[in-house]
Amino acid sequence: MRLYHTSNQLIIEHIPEMGDKNTITLPAIVRKKGSSANYKDGTLEVRIPKNIDMQFSEIDVTEIL
């Protein structure tokens, strides 16, 4: 099994078969560090902390006449 993530997706490889790849879209933007995973009694638990520092960029809107 191999786990890795982007800022908004969790990727799980080689489960249930070798060569399989599952991508899960996360409900929030997450941080790069601080993740952990445990596998016990057939259950995989993955913890990834949310990124609280959301940066916003303003977009200029121009009116086309």
Image (tube, helix red, strand yellow):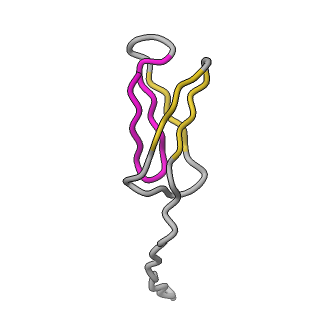
In the displayed structure, does residue 11 sit left or right of residue 39?
Answer: left
> Residue visible at 41% across and 24% down?
13
Q: How many marks?
A: 0
Q: Of residues 35 and 63, which is closer to you in this image?
A: 35
Q: Main secondary structure of the magenta part?
A: strand
Q: In the image, is residue 18 above or below residue 30?
A: above
Q: In the image, is residue 34 above or below residue 25?
A: below
Quarter assignment of residue 21: top left
In the displayed structure, does residue 32 sit left or right of residue 28?
Answer: left
Bounds of the magenta span? Answer: 1-15
Picture coordinates of residue 46, whole percent (x, y):
53, 38
Quadrant of the image containing the N terminus: top left
> Residue visible at 52% across and 58% down?
50
> Residue visible at 53% across and 25% down?
39
In the displayed structure, does residue 40 sit left or right of residue 2?
Answer: right
Quarter assignment of residue 28: bottom right
Q: Is residue 37 magenta?
A: no
Picture coordinates of residue 44, whole percent (x, y):
56, 28
Q: Of residues 31 and 55, which is closer to you in this image?
A: 31
Picture coordinates of residue 51, whole percent (x, y):
49, 63
Picture coordinates of residue 11, whole percent (x, y):
44, 34
Q: In the image, is residue 1 above or below residue 55?
A: above
